[in-house]
Amino acid sequence: EFALDHIDEGYVMILGDDDGLYRNAVDKVALLLQQHQAEAICWGYAPYLWPGIGNLFYHPLFDEVGFRTTAEVLQEVKTDVGKIRALPGFYWGFIDIRYYKMIKQRDGQFFNSSIPDYYAASILAGVISRYLYTDAAFSIGGTSPKSLGVSFVSPDAQKSNGRNEFFAQLDKPVHKRIVFGIDGITALADPYLHAQERSSQLPVLDIKCVLAKALTLVSHGASFQKYQQTVPVLKEIASRNSLQSDFEILLKMHPFVHRDKASKKGSYSIGLNAVRFFPAEYGITNVYDVSLLGSRYQPDVRFTGSYRKNKFTNILSRLKGICYVTWLCLFSDERKYLLRRYLYSFIGK
């Protein structure tokens, strides 16, 4: 907030210290904003797991950009709080600074949750009605051993220095309807609920859906230790929201299921429609060099009018992605690394 107060006009983004920008991202974004007279733009996720976390980089292959309405996205958010990531926010987009000033003047201060990225997107959704969106990415979302998010979702989170320091410095109380767990979902409800109290434009969040989503995540693929630690937290949230009987039904529907950790070897991720790079193969150990690698293959986005995402466009995007990765594996400078993992992309690994 101190930093944002020093901006008088223009568009602003907040870049985390383990995140990065693709080459020429600012120029490309500025051109899109100018061409289409947009007041905000946000984009999809290009995750980079730093050494010590996974040393993986997913470079998305989407190439369409169009207008979305916050009203449409908010209808998805009320039953899936993770969809806040599709709303215009400072951490994954550029926003006209006047919206920050407008909210600060109204509320006295802008940030009213200690989860600043998701709070910003939630509260901005109450004043921005239309914005540019693309599933392509102009920035890289880094996750490092010191990332606060990692300390929140680890089964050993209670011992984490990062998590403990966060709570020691907490200057905004956790919302009374929520308890922070280690499931990766419950903490996202906090910023939305705080924003909802300050904006009549935000629909009521379905806490039952928050509980169901959290249970789904920890019952499939997580460790049994994490499942055991999460259930009491979710039970407390259910109690605070008078959903005890609903929670017992949800719990029976989501028993713990042991699954072997999937091996991510393929050169293409069908789920993310992304090239899967292993930066260590290139001697890369930081987000700057990762951004240079991804920038070599960043598609030029094309304007489609309205943002379109349905079953047909999903299939089409992935068919194009498969064709592009096939070309990379056969003809690009990366073929010696990508080709030997190509088949793994299509046999479930």
Image (spheres, grey):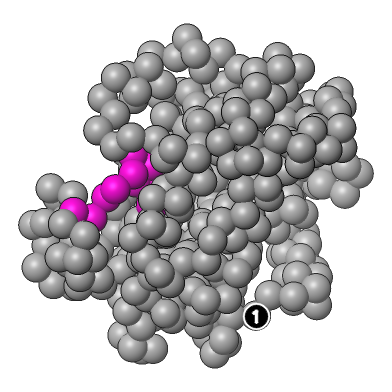
Q: Position of residue 147 (x, y in %)?
A: 42, 29
Q: What residue lies at 45% left-to-right and 43% top-to-bottom?
A: 190
Q: Can see residue 96?
A: yes
Q: Which residue corresponds to the image point at 58% horizontal and 80% vertical from the top-left? A: 307
Q: On the image, which quarter does residue 343 sit in?
A: top right
Residue sitting nearer the eye, 24 or 86: 86
Q: Quadrant of the C terminus?
A: top right
Determine which residue is flagged by label 1: 308
The quadrant holding residue 97 is bottom left
Residues rendered magenta in the picture: 109-119
Left-right relation of 109 to 223:
left
**Residue 7, x across and y down, in percent:** 11, 62
- Nearest the camera: 114 or 320? 114
Which residue extends farthest right?
347
Residue 156: x percent and y percent? 56, 13
Callout 1, which amino acid?
Answer: Arg
Of residue 191 and residue 343, the one placed in the foreground of this image is: 191
Horizontal relation, residue 187 to residue 165: left or right = right
Q: Is residue 288 visible?
A: no
Residue at screen point 50% across, 37% down: 178
Is the residue 300 above or below the residue 22 in the image?
A: below
Q: Is residue 118 magenta?
A: yes
Q: Is residue 22 above or below residue 103?
A: above
- State how many labels appear: 1
Instruction: Provide residue 16's location: percent of width, then percent of height.
Output: 33, 43
Q: Is residue 315 left or right of residue 290?
A: right
Whether the magenta-drawn stretch holds residue 186 is answered as: no
Most foreground residue, 207 or 308: 207
| Element at label 1 | loop
Main SS of residues in magenta:
loop
